[in-house]
Amino acid sequence: MSEEYEYRHEVEDLQQKSATAARLFDVRRIIGGLFVIYGIIVLIAGFTASDADVRKASGININLWTGSCMLAVGLLFLLWMKLRPLSAPGAEPKPEPGRPGGGSGAGTDEPGGREPGSGAG
């Protein structure tokens, strides 16, 4: 019995480490972070643009607009990552409360909540 407990404990540790690694290397974090960093750099360049630079761009401070858009996109990526975090690989998503079909027997034709043709009973 203790060998089975140790085995389950090791499996749970590996699953937790895998979930942590998946969240750490989420591509949304990398893309969002880069957009935020580059957006700030270009935004600073837009604030320090000379009149000659603005005249070259037909009177539009293109660095200011581009930097603010890049910053907004980066913050949206980071917000998306915060609102919809990754789940562990292989883990089933948690059912959201209040969604139809989340309860036992909902949306099935068989009594007891089984799927039709499941072979049980």
Image (cartoon, rainbow, N blue to C red):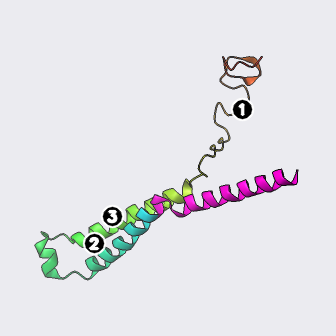
- Would you say residue 55 sits in the magenta stretch? no
Q: Which numbered marker is on residue 67?
A: none
Position of residue 99 relative to residue 53, above or below, is above
Please give left or right for residue 9 compared with residue 107 in the image: right
Task: Give the amino acid at mark 2.
Answer: Leu
N-terminal of the pair, mark 3 or mark 2, is: 2
Residue 41 horizontal/vertical position (percent):
33, 77
- For the residue pair 94 and 68, the one nearer the viewer reads as 94
* Spatial separation of the CA atoms under disc 2 and disc 1: 51 Å
SS state under label 2: helix
Please identify, in this view, whether the residue under mark 2 or under mark 1 is nearer the observer. 1
Q: Residue at x 71, y 59 (%)?
A: 13
Dot 1: within a 10 Å radius of its alpha carbon, few (fewer than 14), some, or many (20 or more) residues?
few
Q: Quadrant of residue 110?
A: top right
Q: Which numbered marker is on residue 64?
A: 2
What range is drawn magenta here? Answer: 1-29
* Spatial separation of the CA atoms under disc 3 and disc 2: 9 Å
SS state under label 3: helix
The answer to whether the residue labelled 2 contacts the one labelled 1, judged by CB atoms less than 8 Å apart, is no
Residue 93 horizontal/vertical position (percent):
62, 44
Please give left or right for residue 81 compared with residue 120 in the image: left
- For the residue pair 48 and 40, the one nearer the viewer reads as 40
* Residue matched to label 1: 103
The answer to whether the residue labelled 3 contacts the one labelled 2, judged by CB atoms less than 8 Å apart, is no
* Residue matched to label 3: 69
Position of residue 120 relative to residue 2, above or below, is above
Residue 74 horizontal/vertical position (percent):
41, 64
Dot 3: within a 10 Å radius of its alpha carbon, few (fewer than 14), some, or many (20 or more) residues?
some
N-terminal of the pair, mark 2 or mark 1, is: 2
